[in-house]
Image: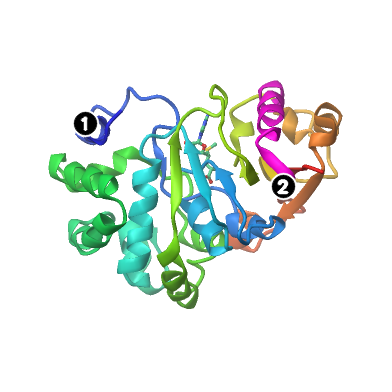
Amino acid sequence: MSVNDDVVSAAARCNGRYNVIPEFWHIYSFNTENIGGYSKYFDLQNKSLLTVGSSGEQVINAHLCGAKAITLYDVNPFAKYYTWLKIAAILRLDYNEYQRFFFEFTSGAVGHGPNVYRFNERLFNKLAPTLKDLDLESYIFWTDLYASIKKKSDIRYIFKDEEFRAKVIKGYSLYLNSEEDFYKAKKAIKSITFNYVHGDLFKDKVEGQFDNIWLSNLCTYHNMYEMYSLIEKLAHNLNVDGRMLFAYLYEIDPTFDDEENDNLMYRLDIAKKYLGDYLSEMHQIQTAREIFWKDKRDKEDLILVYHKK
Ligand SMILES: C[S@@+](CC[C@H](N)C(=O)[O-])C[C@H]1O[C@@H](n2cnc3c(N)ncnc32)[C@H](O)[C@@H]1O
């Protein structure tokens, strides 16, 4: 697929034919998992990473942790364009403008409620020259898409706004939590580079060796047997002493076996038995509920990690 085909497909959805697309062809506008919370459990400084993440947040946050040689491997054809759009925005916009451009709902300094400025063309035109310098294909994609859409705000139809709460988005991030972090990120992001592979991790033969692999919450959509095969396959792509995050579990009480849960990854005793040595580390991460409501309810998000010895 070329960038022109991608524009045609994105424009068709924005202009009203958005109901006939495969799962995951919506870009996650922001991450639904606490990347800022889990990044400290990985050795990223000067190390490589293979990650999914159409929101671009895995790539950006990993870079801010010092990762080099980042590969974004995603089934979403627009993941590369959106990641470069965010990078250009960090470089060119100020903290409030960034929120105005990307947030579905605003909070704090830029007011509360639905954000009528989202993806507005004036801010896009401001960041467009920077985007052009960074990645020409991404520049072509967004400028052609803006030009092909009748009602500009309909650009939202290529997005999935699963996490829309400004407070949670900020709490999950290493660069959005405060204006100070954002300005630090502006400097650090200048050197970012990443390799994008459009593909299906379950079907493809994955090339390359990595110190870290992040598989997000793919386990929400795939059963334990499919996940096991994927982990087994990608273990060959992991360097010795490397770590693979193979499951991000939301709001779990690790001391309680929830027999009602059909997703066996959430049944930790079963997961431990089935995954054996692949389940070598578990880390508890602050939940969205805690960030948003300061409400803990004995539940934490949990990451399941394979540490290759
Ligand atoms: C499981 S989704 C959920 C979003 C995620 N929790 C986050 O915070 O970014 C994570 C990412 O995996 C991508 N994805 C889903 N299935 C995939 C596959 N088979 N191969 C590669 N990427 C995939 C999606 O496009 C999405 O960007």
Percent x, y of residue 65: 58, 63
- Amino acid type of the residue tagged 1 in the rendering: Val
Quadrant assignment, res 247: top right
Label the magenta part by its dominant secondary structure.
Answer: helix
Percent x, y of residue 140: 21, 45
Q: Residue at x 62, y 40 (%)?
A: 209
Label 2 vs 1, first from the N-terminus: 1
Mark nearest the camera among 2 and 1 is 2
Q: Name the foreground residue: 203 vs 287.
A: 203
Disc 1: which residue: 8
Q: Residue at x 67, y 27 (%)?
A: 233
Q: Are marks 2 and 1 in contact (CB under 8 Å)?
A: no
Q: Is residue 226 magenta?
A: yes
**How packed is label 1: few (under 14 Cα within 10 Å), some, or many (20 or more)?**
some
Quadrant assignment, res 161: top left
C-alpha span from label 2 to label 1: 40 Å
Relative horizontal placement of residue 212, taking residue 134 as reference (left or right) = right
Asked if one can make out residue 303 in the rendered structure from this viewpoint, the answer is: no
- Range drawn in magenta: 224-242
Q: Which mark is residue 242?
A: 2
- Amino acid type of the residue tagged 2 in the rendering: Gly
Q: Name the foreground residue: 71 vs 258.
A: 71
